[in-house]
Image (cartoon, rainbow, N blue to C red):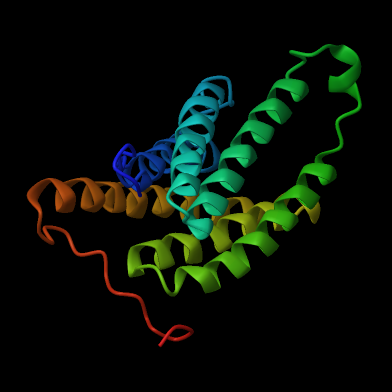
Amino acid sequence: MNQNETKIFTADPSALGLFGLAMVTLVASTAKLGWTSGVSFVIPWAIFLGAFAQLFACVHDAKKGNVFGATAFGAYSFFWLAVAMSWMIKAGVFGAVLASTVDEKQLGVAFLGYLIFTLFMTLGSVETNKVLLIIFFLINFLFGGLTASTLFGIHTGSIVAGWSELLVSVVSFYGCAANVLNRHFEREFLPLGKPLGVFKK
């Protein structure tokens, strides 16, 4: 770095990304569990919290050279954008022709793809912190349940997806709080748990 260059400090974007994840999974889980009905008022949270908040975290993690964080936040951000559009297509927002040709199993295949993605990302989360490890572990059950219910018509899969999604929300709220308060108080106010040290020594 020469004398004319200024080092720019970029704050850890994980707190905002986790808040986005916590909010969208909280709202979406209520529909899966039958506590609310429809997805009309889930769509805004899917777009602005599930997608944009996590996309913001993705971009800033990429600037920090954090491949794992950028990939995770980016992939789940685009997931929520795609799901929101899928709901809108089914509701006829883009016309009756598209709505009439919806095949739910195609969405199930997408859920299966995200299950595969989450499985290997769970391996990566082993070397981050225990809160992230728990979140990824629960997301596996979320996508497993969604795949079972949507692709194979297994009703209990939707129940598993709903409860695991609610737990993802709870743990993500904790992760968000820990990231904010630990930085703010400049000490470990809420523990995140150390990496397991299985793959990295």
- Please tell me whether residue 35 is drawn above or below residue 153 in the rendered image: above
Q: Residue at x 71, y 51 (%)?
A: 111
Q: Position of residue 9 (x, y in %)?
A: 29, 42
Q: Residue at x 52, y 36 (%)?
A: 55
Can residue 120 be seen at all in this image of the molecule?
Answer: yes
Front position in the image: 169 or 194: 194
Q: Residue at x 67, y 55 (%)?
A: 114
- Please tell me whether residue 8 is drawn above or below residue 96 in the rendered image: below
Can residue 154 be seen at all in this image of the molecule?
Answer: no
Left or right: residue 147 versus residue 126 is right
Q: Position of residue 49 (x, y in %)?
A: 45, 31
- Please tell me whether residue 62 is drawn above or below residue 112 in the rendered image: above
Left or right: residue 192 versus residue 55 is left
Front position in the image: 46 or 180: 180
Q: Residue at x 27, y 70 (%)?
A: 193
Q: Position of residue 132 (x, y in %)?
A: 40, 62
Left or right: residue 150 versus residue 124 is right
Front position in the image: 1 or 147: 1
Number of numbered callouts drawn: 0
Question: Residue at the front extreme?
Answer: 3
Front position in the image: 22 or 153: 22
The quarter in which the C terminus is drawn is: bottom left
Q: Position of residue 63 (x, y in %)?
A: 46, 45
Q: Quadrant of residue 87?
A: top right
